[in-house]
Image: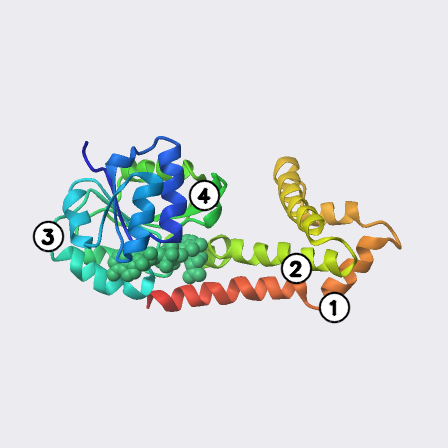
Amino acid sequence: MTIKFGIIGGGVMAEALLSRLILQGIYQPQEVIVSEPQPSRRGFLVQQYGVYVTAENQEVARAVAAEVLFLAIKPQVFETVATELSATAIMPSLVISILAGVPLSKLEAAFPTVPAIRAMPNTPATVGAGMTAIAPGKHVQLHHLEQAQHLFKAVGEVVEVPEALMDAVTGLSGSGPGYVAIVVEALTDGGVAAGLPRAIASQLALQTVLGTAQLLKDSRIHPAELKDRVTSPGGTTIAGIAELERYGFRSALIEAVKAAAIRSKTLGS
Ligand SMILES: NC(=O)C1=CN([C@@H]2O[C@H](COP(=O)(O)OP(=O)(O)OC[C@H]3O[C@@H](n4cnc5c(N)ncnc54)[C@H](O)[C@@H]3O)[C@@H](O)[C@H]2O)C=CC1
Ligand SMILES: O=C(O)[C@@H]1CCC=N1
C-alpha cells in the first residue's frame, strides 16, 4: 500500500490526530509513516496503531514523496529537522505544520514551491472534539486547503484565519485545554474543600464544564446571559462570582491567552 501521510515527530499531538484519523478511516495504518527518535515511543505507535515507524526523518520524506508531510516536532528543533528534510531534495505535495509560532515564511524557505499550511489544532482532537485553525501559504490552491480541512474536520471543527492571527489562536484554543484542565481540577479541589468526596467532586466539576460548554454552543446564548440566568439575587452564585472577581479570575484568563500568544510569536522567531 502507498504511504500517503508522513508524520515527523510522534509525540502527544501527532498521536491525538493519528488516532482519530485512523479510527475515522481517513488513513489506513499502512498508509502512515512516523519518524520518532525515542525507541519506546516508536514501539508504542506500532503496537497501538499499526503504522510504520522509523528513527530517520529522511525516510519519511522519501516514503511520502508526492503525498502529505505533517510536521509535529517541537518548534525548537524545526531548523535542524528542516535542514535534514530539505537535504533529501524530495518535495511532498503538501506540508502541514502544527508547530507553535513557526511562520509560513520559514516553512516555505525550507520547502520551496511546496504548498504549505500552518495549522494549530488542540488535544481534544483525540476525541473528535478538536478545534483547528489553518492558514494557507502562498503556493496553496483550493484543493490543498480542502485536503487540510478534510483532515482536521475528522478530528473536530476547522476555521481558516490569516496567518497574522495564528499566534492568538495558539494562545486561545491551542493552549486552552491546559487552562480548562486547571479549571476542572480547581473546581474539584473546591468541592473537596466544601466537603465532597473527591470522586464525586471530580464528576461534578467535569460534567459542569462539559454541560456548560454544550449549552452555550447549542443555545448560542451569550455567556453573560447564561451567567445572569444562574445568578439568583442574594443567592449562592453571586457569592461565588464575587470571589472570582476579587481574585482576578477573568483577567487571569485574558492575560494567560495574551502571554501564550506572545510566547508563540517568540518561539517562531
Ligand atoms: N500539545 C499540544 O496540545 C499541541 C501542540 N502543538 C504543537 O505540536 C508540536 C508537537 O507538540 P507535542 O506533541 O506536544 O510535543 P511532544 O514532545 O509530545 O512531541 C514531539 C515529538 O517529537 C520527537 N522528536 C524530537 N526531536 C525530533 C527530531 N529531531 N525528529 C523527529 N522527531 C523528534 C519527540 O521525541 C516527541 O515524541 C509542537 O510544535 C507544538 O507546538 C500544537 C497544538 C497543540
Ligand atoms: O504549549 C505549547 O507550546 C503547545 C502549543 C499549543 C499547545 N501546546
Local packing at callout 4 (Cα closer than 10 Å; few below 14, some 14-19, many 20+) is: many
> Could you tell me residue 181's position as x and y percent?
57, 55
Q: Amino acid at mark 4?
A: Thr
The residue indicated by pointer 1 is 246
Q: Where is residue 200 drawn, in percent x and y? A: 71, 48
How far apart are the two marked residues, 1 and 3, measured between alpha carbons?
A: 58 Å
Placement of the C terminus among the 4 image quadrants: bottom left
The residue that mark 3 highlights is 89
Where, quadrant-wise, is the N terminus in this rendering? top left
Horizontally, residue 8 falls left or right of residue 56, namely: right
Helix, strand or loop under label 1: helix
Q: Residue at x 71, y 68 (%)?
A: 247
Amino acid at the residue labelled 3: Ala
Question: Residue 186: which disc?
Answer: 2
Q: Residue at x 45, y 67 (%)?
A: 262
| SS type, badge 4 | helix
What residue would you read off at disc 4? Answer: 126
- Residue at mark 2 to residue at mark 3: CA–CA distance: 50 Å
Q: Is residue 136 visible?
A: no
